[in-house]
Image (cartoon, rainbow, N blue to C red):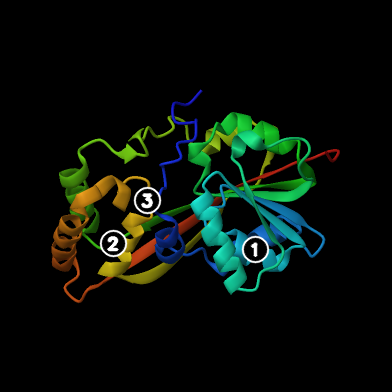
Amino acid sequence: MENHLQYDPTLFQGTASYYSSYRFPYPEELFQHIVQSFHLDKNSQVLDLGCGTGNLSIPLASYCQNVIGMDPDPEMLREAKRLATLNQVENLELVLGSSWDISNDMGPFQATIMGESFHWMDRDGVLNALYDVIASYGGIAIVSKKQIGPSGYQEVVDQVIKEFLGEKRKAGKGFYSHPTERHEVVLSRSRFSILEPYRFEYQVEKTIEDLIGFLYSTSYANKRLLGDEVENFEKELRQGLISVGSSGKLSFQVTVTALMGRKDGKGC
């Protein structure tokens, strides 16, 4: 068992508005690839496990009959509901729950997506549970993003975070421990048949305010963790980032990947 599995309700406390506004976006090409890979249409039901503020659920809903977004954080779900209403998305059902709540009473789903959430879960257990609620020839997509900024950006961010929050990466009430095995290894020993991984790259410009907002969306540098040091943190971070991008704008290369698995044989 991995040591960060039990849900900590403080993990993303106070981050929901920043999460919906400042996370790097998922490209339309990703949604089209998921739709084509699992033959999604207006008869399909999809599960977004660890949906957060609906950054995957809301765009994907336009392709499906119904999307269920499940997340253990009520703040995230409230923000997702606000955004769904704002975007007039009526076929998104938001459910309070975690990966531990997957049961055979759910589904069947034509696909399950997990956007930057899989590393918080009991990954082997989740894949085993999902296999039983996914329809025959449906599948899963484990989606990740990596953003690389200009030279010096990451060094500045790491230095300021360590100055205010310490050397060890914080997460909720404790510290973060990254899984020792790659997602690919975990997926390869599951019952799913492995599909060709998806990869897409794009470039985007971010302002310094955008980047501060992004950090406030994270489990490791949010306002709850910073407490009374928020103002000093922002001041020092701005100064450091101005030295990297004097115009106040920084260019990022974003790589979006999706590990894909399909359920073969008889349906659930």
- Residue 14 is tagged as none
- Residue 205 as seen in the image, left or right of residue 48: left
- Residue 60 is tagged as 1
Q: Residues within 10 Å of mark 2 (few under 14, many from 20)?
A: many
Residue 60: x %, y % from top left: 65, 63
Q: Would you place residue 205 above or below residue 48 in this image?
A: below
Residue 154: x %, y % from top left: 24, 54
Given contact means CB atoms under 8 Å apart, are the residues at marks 3 and 1 in contact? Answer: no
The image quarter containing residue 190 is top right
Q: Is residue 54 visible?
A: no
At numbered mark 2, what does the secondary structure look like: helix, strand or loop? helix
Q: Earlier in the sequence, mark 2 or mark 1?
A: 1
The image quarter containing residue 261 is top right
The amino acid type of the residue labelled 2 equals Ile
Residue 170: x %, y % from top left: 31, 39
Q: Earlier in the sequence, mark 3 or mark 1?
A: 1
Q: Would you place residue 98 above or below residue 6 in this image?
A: below
Front in this rendered view, residue 151 or 113: 113
Quote the CA–CA distance across marks 2 and 1: 28 Å
Q: Would you place residue 185 above or below residue 198 in this image?
A: above
- Residue 218 is tagged as 3
Residue 39: x %, y % from top left: 76, 58
| Labels 2, 1: front one | 2
The amino acid type of the residue labelled 3 equals Thr
At numbered mark 3, what does the secondary structure look like: helix, strand or loop? loop
Looking at the image, which residue is at 59% across and 30% down?
124
Which residue is situated farthest in the right direction here?
Answer: 266
The amino acid type of the residue labelled 1 equals Leu
The residue carrying mark 2 is 212
